[in-house]
Amino acid sequence: MKVAFDSRPAKCTHGVGRYARCLLEALADLDDCEVLKTHQPRRCDVFHSPWLDGAMPRCPVPMVVTVHDLSPLKRRGEYLRSTLRFKLRVLAVQRAARVIAPTVAVAQEVETVLDVEPGRIAVIPEAPAASLHARSAEEVRAVRARFSLPEHYLVWVGAMQTPEPRKRIAALARTAHSMPLVLVGPTAPWAHQLPDVKLTGAVSDDELAAIYTGAHALVFPSCDEGFGLPPVEALACGTPVVVSDVPALREVLDGRATFGAVDDLPGLIAAAESAERPAPPPPAWTWGDAAEATWRVYLEAVGETGSCQIARPKHRAAALVKDA
């Protein structure tokens, strides 16, 4: 079976970019899997758009769309421009053969908000990249020196090219904290106006893993999330996690994080500053598991369920992922 995978978001610096890169890499480890990196799906058996922006209202082959969250529809006042574009993709999602959601919370919203039948929705969680694991004391010291980080700090991770009110970064920066707050991720001018924070800008995966490892705790104050990959990444690096108690984060992290009331940022900061190691391990789910589950969705989308064996190859050469 030949799969057309829209790889354009793999270049993005936010969560959908991580999703596309990690899933493509894991698909390459599956046996009998041919993936063509293209957003033009003709002469393929199935098309996967890993983001809403790539969903096609009139796709020439069965289409699978990953819906990461529905914030632009649920929070229209905060996403005026993107909501207009977002609406154009709703029809495409409704016509998709299958829809992938990262959590049950998002799957339920796809069903109720987008009016998609439950039988066409698959819940496939995300996972930390293999490179995101606890680093040595030497690596932590090196990254502290590189970015002028203090010995003890709280960390937040995400993209800051545009302000997203649901992420509540500005509110977090304004909340009193006795421990320095480090914000990690690509920035825009507005982020440099935030008070009393340290910005690292974009970092490599090795640097990110060391920053996670060296942090006292990750604080994640979002009032709406589709999955919450940074908390899972932090746990993979051995760092305690404190998050707002919202449905998707509760689903993914229950028993692995400290939860705070959405409207209590001082309490969230206090919990993060008093966090103790060792942190619980992240969920056992891997990108390999995600790739196998996604391949089954492809089979369902083309009506071939059970016609192919899904297994990890002994050698990566057994699979083929190529550019168009």
Image (cartoon, grey):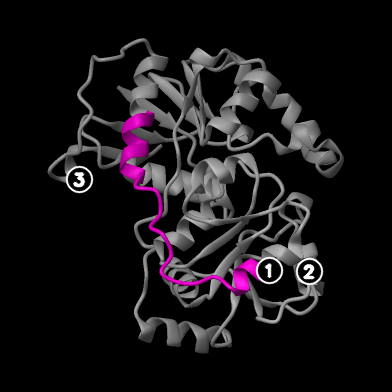
Q: CA distance from mark 2 to mark 3?
A: 43 Å
Residue wearing tag 3 = 316
For the C terminus, which image quadrant? Answer: top left
Query: To which residue does mark 1 refer?
Result: 269
Q: Is residue 287 magenta?
A: yes
Give the mark nearest the N terminus, 2 or 3. 2
Q: Is residue 64 left or right of residue 222?
A: left
Q: Residue at x 39, y 82 (%)?
A: 139
Say which residue appears at 51% left-offset and 36% top-offset.
102
Q: CA distance from mark 3 to mark 1?
A: 44 Å
Judge whether 177 appears above or below 247 on screen.
Answer: below
- Residue at 63% over, 65% down: 186
Determine the secondary structure under disc 2. helix
**Three-letter code, disc 1:** Ile
Q: Which residues are magenta?
A: 270-294
Tell me the amino acid under the disc marked 3: Arg
Q: Which residue is tagged 2?
A: 189
Mark earlier in primary sequence (2, 1): 2
Measuring from the top left, give residue 284's x and y in whole percent.
34, 47
